[in-house]
Image (cartoon, rainbow, N blue to C red):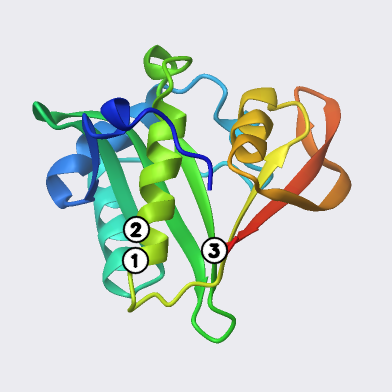
């Protein structure tokens, strides 16, 4: 597994999402101008913070997802990004993950920090017992492709013209990593 400078990763931590984090995450989603760039699924913005909070807390409580926020250890109240494990499959010991950084935190190496911390949690959490992590991204999302490949995720598949973004078609790329690699 690729690792970045230890000094940098030691400055940050992933915290499990609590209700206190949800207003900021909701605001990021609400403010993101290009949310459709980050998913091939229909974009569904919650109508209210209350609705978002109820649905998110329910999916976490039901074990459908694990959500984390990235914070600096000296400022744990300031959220920098979030990552989520979802489609957790205990039978196949696999999970999909996604990540998000608000625009003002992109290009600073925080995606690498967040992914490295998520990989660490995924490898160490014996309750999850994960063997494989996977992520999907649009073929035009070059920063995401670069990040996944830097961490030795393998391109497993391509769904041709699966993303429609502003009337242009892009392939959906499916990357995975076996955690023992």
Label ID, residue 124: 1
Mark 2 to mark 3: distance in Å?
11 Å
The residue nearer to you, when weighing 63 against 152, is 152
Residue found 38% across the figure and 28% down from its top: 5
Q: Is residue 166 above or below residue 127?
A: above
Residue 45 seen in the figure: no
The residue tagged 2 is 121
Outermost residue toward the bottom? Answer: 91
Residue 29 position, x and y percent, is: 41, 32
Residue at the image point whose x is 49% and y is 82% from the top: 90
- Number of other residues with Cα within 10 Å of mark 1, as a class: few under 14, some 14 to 19, many 20 or more: few
x and y percentages locating residue 48 in the rendered image: 30, 40
On the picture, is 105 further left or further right than 174? left
Of the 4 image quadrants, the one containing the C terminus is bottom right
Q: Which residue is mark 3?
A: 179
Q: Where 125 falls versus 138 (above or below)?
A: below
């Amino acid at each position: 597994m690729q690792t970045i400078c230890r000094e940098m990763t030691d400055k940050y931590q992933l915290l499990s999402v609590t209700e206190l984090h949800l207003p900021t995450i909701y605001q990021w989603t609400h403010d993101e101008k290009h949310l459709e760039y980050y998913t091939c699924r229909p974009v569904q913005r919650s109508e209210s913070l209350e609705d978002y909070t109820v649905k998110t807390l329910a999916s976490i409580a039901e074990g459908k997802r694990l959500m984390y926020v990235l914070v600096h250890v000296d400022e744990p109240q300031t959220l920098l990004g979030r990552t989520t494990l979802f489609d957790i499959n205990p039978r196949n010991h696999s999970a999909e993950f996604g990540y998000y950084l608000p625009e003002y935190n992109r290009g600073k190496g925080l995606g690498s920090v967040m992914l490295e911390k998520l990989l660490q949690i995924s490898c160490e959490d014996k309750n999850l017992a994960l063997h494989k992590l996977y992520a999907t991204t649009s073929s035009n999302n070059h920063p995401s492709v670069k990040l996944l490949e830097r961490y030795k995720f393998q391109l497993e598949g391509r769904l041709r013209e699966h993303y429609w973004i502003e009337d242009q078609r892009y392939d959906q790329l499916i990357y995975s990593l076996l955690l023992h690699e």
